[in-house]
Image: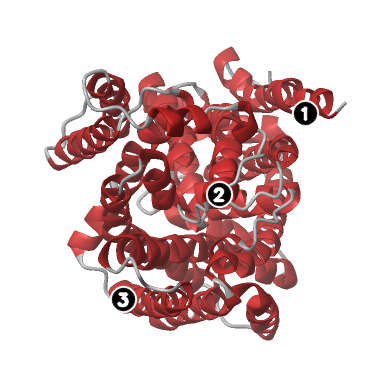
Amino acid sequence: MGSITATNLVVLIVYLLLMVGIGIYCRRYTTQLEGFFVGFRNLGPWLLAFTYFATYYSSSVMIGNSGVGYKAGLAWFFMPIAQVLLIPIGLLLFAKALMNASKQMGVITIPDYFRARYKSTLPSGVLALIMVVFLVPYMVAVTKGGALAFETLLGVPYKWAVVIIIVITAAYSVVGGFMSGVITDMIQGIILLFGAVTIFIVSLSAAGGPAGVAMKLQAIDPQLIETPGTLGWAGLLGFSFVFGIAPWGLPQLLQKTLAMKSRRVVGPSAIVVLLTALFILYTCNGSGIIARALFGNEFLENPDYAFPVLVLRYLPPLMSAILLTAVVAAVMSTLDGILLVAAGAVSRDLYQQIINKKASDKSVLRLTWIIMLILSVITLFAAFKPPAMLLYLTAFSFSLMTATILAPMFFGIYYKKSTLAGCVASQLVGITVVLVLTLLKVKFLIHPLIPGLIAALITLPVVSSFTKKLPEDFVTRIFSNEYKQGKLTS
Amino acid sequence: MFGTPWPTWLGWFLSPILTVVMIFVVWLVEIRKNKKIEE
């Protein structure tokens, strides 16, 4: 569909070189394990907001969301409501507690938080295993989506697109660790927003503004201007809720909050994340809806083409090249965050905390680099020809991680009586409910995540009520005002 | 509005309105509280 032009190539090469340059610049942070995973805990509001935003929204927001908008019509403008409500609430609820655990208990990964809070490597081991098994298929799916968009927009063969995405992301992530991910996310997030807003404005004006879009859609199919339209209220609000609550329990996002420099970062960064989420969702969803008005039923069989075709037909060459870069940026910014937390789950949480407790930080750091490279190679070959089983796993990777993390984290922060047995039981119940409902394809409460979460949230306090309590002095200490104000050290 | 039924045009404005509300909520429960603690 697209083809390689000199402009495309120059913009892309400049972007890729910039990413590698940032990786090299961030080498100074990676001499120690803490620097590699949390960048010496020095994130301010802008960096935190943009890395959170760019890590959550991958190319699927441009391609997938606009594809649904193309099929569903104007009702899809309702979709962002749960995300703009829930994403800032999630930051307010969890960010400070995770930062405190990081600064005062030496926590550097999310499974590490479970180990420190519940004083056992059992819940951290369960979570680390879940992360390793389900984050790799997720990386394959993200790479596949990005490479397909790359192929469509630029005409680069699919396999070359996979190689470029993986090699560059692995290069800057291994060399520059957490901080290279954060700084590249900032740039990638800005490109992503700029691209999405530009195509929305250009296509809206081409379609004759909101009234023009509505008129054209009504002529194609009157259902397209109705809300909830073909999706129904349950579908529309249910999926909005699932994608709004998911960030509360995704390790690649929570990892960022471990690195905040102070409690004052939370408020301003929540506002910036909120605004970026609104802009990206509104414009990407809207672009798909406008594409339907402009193209009619041309892409009904393949709605994922709606966004790339808008770019190719309505933008001049330089802008189209920047938009292409935005899609690649969206993929890389998500991949780098996942690569880091997946490698950390193996090297820190499984190896250093369980298999070899005497392992020095230096040797764990070296192991992390090796694991990152191995995971990158697995993702590369798996993305060449994704096995059906692997892609099937991605269908519930999101839900499984959120169902495993959210309840023990929430109660760990707000419920003094949470016990180790309650935590592990809640994890296992959450995992079981999500797996069973997904594998049996049972439609219950819209999405397997919702019953999985409810079951996990009920299990923890119930099991905690009759199982062995954690040491009194430890619980008193982590619920004290001194601890909450960051005045205690481990 | 724009020739669409009311639930549809409400959908166009709802997420921007909620965003403004949430910015106020974040300011109220987080930013203002932190300033008070520091004072």
**Subunit ID for the residue under disc 1:** B
Residue A287, image x, y percentages: 59, 46
Residue occupying the point 70% across, 62% down: A315
Q: CA distance from mark 3 to mark 2?
A: 31 Å
Q: Which residue is mark 1?
A: B34
Q: Which residue is mark 3?
A: A378
Q: Choose between A58 and A284: the one closer to the eye.
A: A58
Q: Choose between A6 and A239: the one closer to the eye.
A: A239
Judge whether A433 appears above or below A324 on screen.
Answer: above
Residues behind callouts 1 and 3 on a single chain: no
Q: Quadrant of residue B6?
A: top right
Of labels 3 and 2, earlier in sequence is 2
Q: Residue furthest front?
A: A473
Mark 1 vs mark 2, foreground winner is 2
Give the amino acid type for the residue marked by disc 2 in the picture: Ser
Q: Residues within 10 Å of mark 1 (few under 14, many from 20)?
A: some
Q: Does residue A76 appear in this view?
A: no
Q: Residues within 10 Å of mark 2 (few under 14, many from 20)?
A: many
Residue occupying the point 67% across, 67% down: A320
Residue A387, image x, y percentages: 21, 67
Residue occupying the point 39% across, 26% down: A238
Give the amino acid type for the residue marked by disc 3 in the picture: Ile
Residues behind callouts 1 and 2 on a single chain: no
Element on which disc 2 rests: helix
Asked whether the residues under the numbered discs 3 and 2 touch, taking CB atoms below 8 Å apart as contact, a structural biologist would say: no
Q: Which mark is residue A102?
A: 2
Element on which disc 3 rests: helix
